[in-house]
Image (cartoon, rainbow, N blue to C red):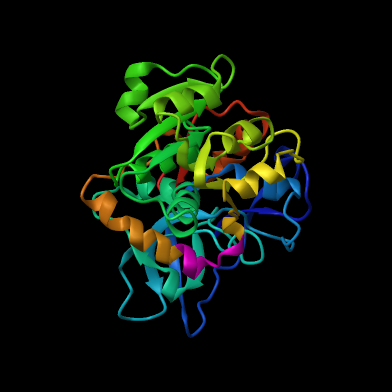
Amino acid sequence: MKALRFYKFGDPAEVLRIEEVPEPLPGPEEVLVKVHAASLNPSDVKNVQGNFGKTTLPRIPGRDFAGVITAGDKDMIGQEIWAAGGDIGFTRDGSHTEYIVIPKKAARPKPKSLSMSEAASVGINYITAYLGLVERAGLKDGETLLVTGATGGVGSSVVKIAKLKSVRVIGVDRKQMDPERAKQSGIDLALSSESDDIVNRTKEFTGGKGVDVIFDCVGGPLFEAALNSLGVGGRQVNITSVGDRRVCFDLLDFYHRQLTLFGVDTAKLDIVACGNILESLRPGFEDGRLTPPEIARTCSLDELIGGYEQVATGTATGKIVFLLES
């Protein structure tokens, strides 16, 4: 079978190669899946660059995909499934290939309303959003949420999940968002980190109370402003830090306001746990309350190295998905 593979870490254009490799064989509690579509995440690029300490080589990268079970549990053969995350792409061969072996408990039914490419694009972005917003911060009806990096892959997924509840959403992005587009995406108040005073505007919006939950997709330069926008008993989720990894905040103020800070890293979940989250999200996609990310480009497996280059250089403008049929 054909697969994307790397033997050392470095620039994706230099270390990735398309190879013919043996088709993997499923074990007793595993299934073989023919990959129909797989998406490309920034974390895939960072993995190839050597930014994850746990990756073993040689390795087939890729974390999110959708396909059809072709071998393993006879009762599951022919099922259309989606899966993502866990150790695939790190210590287990990933999804940027024609066939992949995964634990059968991780193979969850694909939403019938989504195409293979749409299902493959959901993965890590939505899993990160759900893990932080629902399982860690415990967002409740009637609360107010602030999302930094609100138009990014994870940020936009956070907004969509939040809108499953009766929650008011403040979206922060570097540039000023188009008001109509922000409203359509579910954002009630759109702020620019370059031109708006986030803390004051947030306090005005909440009647001086501050927000209940913050999902910070930026960290670094926005961390302290976000934290200062929380009300008493507020919860903040952090998933990364752009630029400076070190931040400062008033510890006395932190404990007097009884705040909680959560660090969320989906790489610590195994693929079965990620499958459980996808299963929790599936009803929202099937009834239309949740929508997949916008796909900017589809390509063949042979063209996927170019996609890695685009993401690595910051020239990709949306989700890239490889289709096996291309």
**Residue at (48%, 70%) from the top-left corner?**
272
Residue drawn at x 57%, y 51% is 258
User: Is residue 20 visible from the viewing direction of this image?
Assistant: yes
Residue 271 inside the magenta-drawn segment: yes
The magenta segment: 268-274
Q: How many marks?
A: 0
Residue 10 image offset from top left, x and y in percent = 78, 44
Residue 28 position (above or below residue 183)? below
* Left or right of residue 215, residue 36 in this image: left
Q: Is residue 313 magenta?
A: no
Nearer to me, 35 or 136? 136
Residue 139 is situated, as x and y percent measured from the top left of the image, at: 40, 51
Asked if residue 300 shows in the view, the reply is no
Quadrant location of the N terminus? bottom right
Relative to residue 71, is residue 56 drawn left or right? right
Q: Is residue 324 above or below residue 271?
A: above
Q: Overall secondary structure of the magenta stretch?
A: helix
Give above or below for 224 relative to 50.
above
Front position in the image: 129 or 61: 129
Residue 83 percent location from the top left of the image: 44, 60
Report the residue that reaches farthest toward the front: 256
Residue 247 falls in which quadrant of the image? top right
List the single residue furthest toward the bottom.
28
Q: Nearer the viewer, residue 97 or 222?
A: 222
- Based on the displayed image, in which of its 4 quarters is residue 198 positioned? top right
Q: Position of residue 158 (x, y in %)?
A: 43, 43
Query: Which residue is found at the position 50% from the left and 52% from the top?
Result: 132
Q: Residue furthest left?
A: 287
Image quarter (top left, top right, bottom left or bottom right) of the C terminus = top left
